[in-house]
Image (spheres, coloured by chain):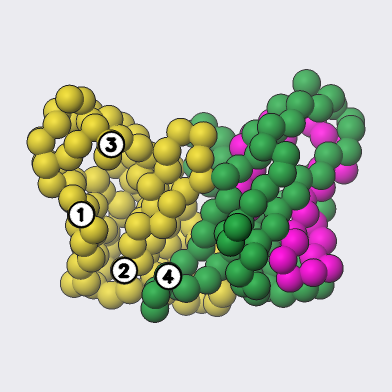
Amino acid sequence: DAGITQSPRYKITETGRQVTLMCHQTWSHSYMFWYRQDLGHGLRLIYYSAAADITDKGEVPDGYVVSRSKTENFPLTLESATRSQTSVYFCASRGLAGTTDTQYFGPGTRLTVL
Amino acid sequence: EDQVTQSPEALRLQEGESSSLNCSYTVSGLRGLFWYRQDPGKGPEFLFTLYSAGEEKEKERLKATLTKKESFLHITAPKPEDSATYLCAVQDWNSGNTPLVFGKGTRLSVIA
C-alpha cells in the first residue's frame, strides 16, 4: 500500500532501554521528519532528513538518534529511554498534494517508558 | 523565532452552528500556512495550504482564509463528523526546506 507507515504502533519499555521506532514511506519523498506530540506542547520536531545520509536536528533532539541509509526508511532510536520520552511519535514525509507542497503523516507510535 | 497561536483551545458547537477557528502567526517570511485535521489516535491529515494574504481555499464545509497576521478556518453548518482537533502550522522562507512549526490546536466538538 502506498503511504507512510510506522511500527510498532504501541510500545511499552523501561527506563534505560534502547528503543527504535520505524518509519517507512513508499513515495520516494526526499524529506522525512520525526515529531513528538504531548499534551500542552503540540507537535515538536525532533529530527529531519533531506535525503539519504543527510540529517539535522529539530527543536527537541536530545536523547534521540536517527539514521537514513535508504530514502524510504527513517528510524528513530532512543538510546537510553527516560520517562520524559513517553509520548506519541509521528513520522512525516514531504511531498505534493496536486501543486501544493505539504507534509504527510504516519499513524503514530504511542511510546510509554516506565 | 516562528510562533503559532491557535484559539480557542476547545470549541463546542451544536450541529449546524457555524463558527471560526483562529491561527495567529509570527514569521519573518511566510512560505506557507497549513491546516490539518487530527482525529483521536491518528496522525494529522492535510487540509489546506495558503501562500499569500487574501488567499482562500474551500473543502466541503471548511473554508480557510489568510491575512498577513492570521488565518481563519471557517466551519459552515458543521456536522458531528467534523469533530476533531484542527492544527495550524507555518513554514518560514528563512528556514528553507525545514519543517513546519505547529500551533497547539483547537479541539472541536460538534454535538447532534
Q: Residue at x 75, y 50 (%)?
A: A22
Which of the two discs, 1 and 2, sits closer to the camera?
Answer: 1
| Residues in magenta, as a range | A66-92
Task: Name the residue beneath numbered marker 2.
Answer: B50
Q: Callout 2: helix, strand or loop?
A: strand
How far apart are the alpha carbons under marks 4 and 1? 17 Å
Provide residue B101's location: percent of width, then percent of height.
49, 57
Q: Position of residue B69 (x, y in %)?
A: 27, 62
State the SS at label 1. loop
Circles 4 and 1: CB atoms closer than 8 Å? no
Q: Which residue is mark 3?
A: B81
Q: Tell me the SS state at disc 3.
A: helix
Residue name at image x 41 percent, y 66 percent? B27
Residue type at tag 1: Glu
Q: Amino acid at mark 4?
A: Ala
Please tell me if label 2 and label 4 are on a single chain: no
User: In the image, what residue type sits under mark 2?
Assistant: Leu
The chain in yellow: B
Q: Which of pointers 3 and 2 lies earlier in the amino acid sequence?
A: 2
Amino acid bearing label 3: Glu
Crowding at label 2, few (<14), some or many (≥20) Cα neighbours within 10 Å? many
Give the residue pinned by disc 4: A97
Whole-percent x and y of residue B23? Answer: 30, 52
